[in-house]
Image (tube, rainbow, N blue to C red):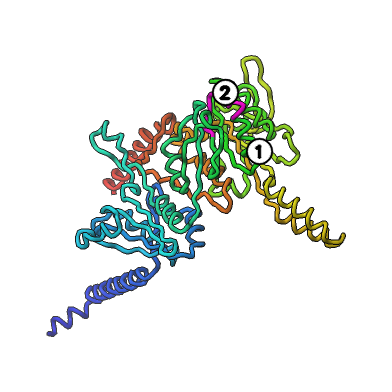
Amino acid sequence: MNRIKKFFQTTESRNGSYSVGITVLVLVIVIILNLIVGQLPEKIRNIDVSSTKIYEITDTSKELLKKLDQDVTMTVLADKSDTDERIKTFLSKYSALSDHISVKWIDPVLHPSALNEYQASENSIVVSCEETGKTTTVSFDDIIVMDQASYYYTGTATEAEFDGEGQLTSAVNYVTTTENHTIYRTSGHGESTFSTTISDLMDKSNDTVTELNTVMDASIPEDCDLLLMYAPTTDLSETEVSALEAYLQKGGKMMVILGDKEKGELPNLEALMKTYGLEMADGYIADTQRNYQGNYYYIFPELSLDSDLSSGISSEMVLVINSHGLTQIDPARDTITTTPFMTTSQGGYAVTEDAQTEGTYVLGAVATESVTDAASADAATSDSAENAEDTDATSETDTSENTASEVNTTQSRLTVIASASLIDPQVTDSFSTLENSQLFMNAVTANFDDTQNISIEPKSLTAEYNSVQHGGLLSILVIFVLPAAVLISGLVVWIRRRRA
C-alpha cells in the first residue's frame, strides 16, 4: 500500500492523472456538444460540402415553400435503410423549409398493399395535397439521373445529374395549384423541336405543350394560353398572318424564336413583327465588346430585365451564337409598347457579305398592347345608350363611368427572340453555368398572370477535374522547381544534424 501511495505521489503520476482528467473533460464536452447539435433543425445541422452543391436549395423553391399555405404529404415508398443517402438528406433539408410539408416512409416489403393504395412503384415519392385532391409521383430515377449513353461506351451507366429540388418543387407546385397552362407549338414551317432539357423544364412548370399545324388550320384554339413558334424556316401564309393578328388583337400571347434566316426568307412573319415595332436587320450580328474569347459572333447580350424576366437570374450572363438581329421602329399603332430586354453593346455590327453596319441591335424584345374585348365594348355601348335616355346629365356621367369599368380590357403580348441558339443544346449543355434556359423559361411564364417560373435545372454529378491546358512556367515550377527546393532543404537539414 505504501508503494502504491508513493507511486501516485510522484511527478509522473500527477502529470498522468492530469492528462487523464483533461481527456475525460474533453470527451464529456464533445458528447454534450453532439447532443446539443443533434437537437438543432435539419436545415441548420446539415451543411452542404458537396462539390456540385446538390443540397443547395434555390430562392425559387424557398419562396414557393414560404408562401405555401396548404398541407403537402410526401410518402416515400422505399426501405429507408437502403435508400440513397443523398435522397434522404435532401428530403430532410427540403421538408424542413416549411411546416406544411410532412414526410412519411413506408417500406413496401413490409406493407406491399401500399403500392396498390398509392398506385405507385417501389422507390418513389408520392406527393399529395388533401385540400386540392391532386397527387403526383416522383421516381428515385428522376432524382438521380443516369447517363444511359455511357453504357454503350463503358458497359456501365454512370450517374449524370441530381434533380431533387427540380422534381420536388415541381411536384409541390402541381399539387397545390389549380392552374394549368396550355401552350401550342406551331408546326408546318420547318420549325425545330425542343431539346430534352427544355422539354423537361416545361414539364416541371406544369405546362401542357401541344403541336398545332397552322398550315392545315390557321385558327387558334380558345384554350391557347401561349402560341410558340420555334425557329421556322418557311414563311407564314397571308391567311395565317390574318389569324395571328386577330388572335393578338383579342389579347392573345405569342412567342417567336427566330432561326437561321439564310434557310429562307420570311416576309410575312417579318411584316407581323414590324406591326409591333421590330424590323429584321440584314446579315449576322457581331459584337466587338461583349463576346466569348474574341469570337465576335459569340455574344453575351446586355440584359434589361423587368420583374417578370429577372426571376432566378443572378449572373445576367447568357450566350447567343450566330444570331440575327432586330432594330426597333415605330409600331403600327400608338397603343403598342415595344421594350427590348436583350441587346448588343454599342459595339454591335450587322455583318453581310457587302457591308458591316455598326449599331446597337435588339436580340430580344416584348411588345404589349392593351386591347378591349369587342363583345363587351358593344354591350357597354348599348347599355350606355339605353341608360342615357332615362337619366339627366349628371347621372349620365356616372352611368358612363360605371359602364366603362365593365368593359373587359386585356393585354396582348408578342415576345421575339432573335436567335434559336438561346436554347440550343450545344449552348445550354456546353455552358451549363450560363442562364440561357432560365431566361427562356422566364419569358414563357411571363405570358401567364400571377405565375412564376419554378423550373429548376438539375445539378451535375459528373466528376470535376482541374486541368491546365497551357501550363508554361507554372508547369516548370510545380514539376521541377518545388520538388528540387524540397530535396535541397531536406539535404541541408540532414547535413546540419550530422555535424551537430
Disc 2 residue type?
A: Lys
In the current view of this chain or complex, which residue is farthest to the bottom?
Answer: 1
Front-lying residue, 331 or 298? 331
Left or right of 397? Residue 277 is left
Disc 1 residue type?
A: Pro
Task: Please name the residue shown 35% across and 49% down the image.
Answer: 143
Q: Which percent across, then down, holds residue 480? A: 36, 33
Task: Please name the residue shown 25% across and 33% down the image.
Answer: 154
As for residue 61 lying within the magenta part, the answer is: no
Q: Which percent across, then down, holds residue 149? A: 31, 34
Q: Nearer the viewer, mark 2 or mark 1?
A: 2
Q: Taking the image as drawn, is residue 308 in sight?
A: yes
Which part of the image, by quadrant, shows the N terminus? bottom left
In the current view of this chain or complex, which residue is farthest to the top?
Answer: 354
Answer with the quarter of the image where residue 324 lies. Answer: top right
**Mark 1 burial class by Cα count in 10 Å: few <14, some 14-19, many 20+:** many
Cα gap from disc 2 to disc 1, whole angstroms: 20 Å
Q: State the extent of the magenta-drawn residues as a range.
A: 229-239
**Mark 2 burial class by Cα count in 10 Å: few <14, some 14-19, many 20+:** some
Task: Please name the residue shown 67% across and 42% down the image.
Answer: 368
Q: Are marks 2 and 1 in contact (CB under 8 Å)?
A: no
**Mark number displayed over residue 261:** 2
Count of numbered circles on the image: 2
**Mark number displayed over residue 340:** 1
Q: Secondary structure at mark 2?
A: helix
